Image (cartoon, rainbow, N blue to C red):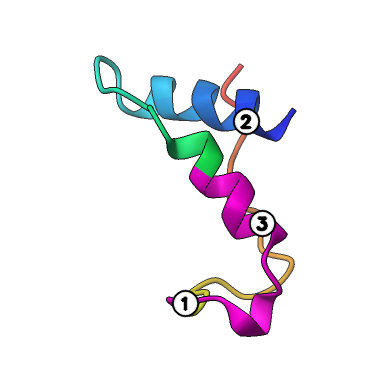
Amino acid sequence: WMGRQIKKHCAAKYPGESAKGVSMYAWMRSTQIRRLRTPAPQVARGTKLIKDVD
């Protein structure tokens, strides 16, 4: 589900650009323990990041 939403958002925001690897990066980033992430998260916990693109 997350991968499809990210690809949809990228296609809407950056038309004509390749989104190859973006969903995999987002999945890998979301499964890491927050305190151990490198580079460190720049957004506070609970912040809504993506608006619906529909």
- Sequence-earlier tag: 3 or 1: 3
Q: For mark 2, does the 10 Å Cα neighbourhood hold few (<14), some (14 to 19), or many (20 or more) residues?
A: some
From the viewer's perspective, is 54 left or right of 33? left
Q: Secondary structure at mark 1?
A: loop
Query: Is residue 31 inside the magenta stretch?
Result: yes
Q: Relative to 50, does residue 31 appear above or below in the rendering?
A: below
Label ID, residue 38 = 1
Residue 44, how many percent across, how many down?
62, 75
For label 2, the residue is 3
Region rendered in magenta:
25-39
- Residue at disc 2, secondary structure: helix
What quarter of the picture does the N terminus occupy? top right
Which residue bears the numbered disc 3? 30
Q: Which amino acid, mark 1?
A: Thr
Mark 3–mark 1 Cα distance, whole angstroms, equals 12 Å
From the image, which quarter does the C terminus lie in?
top right
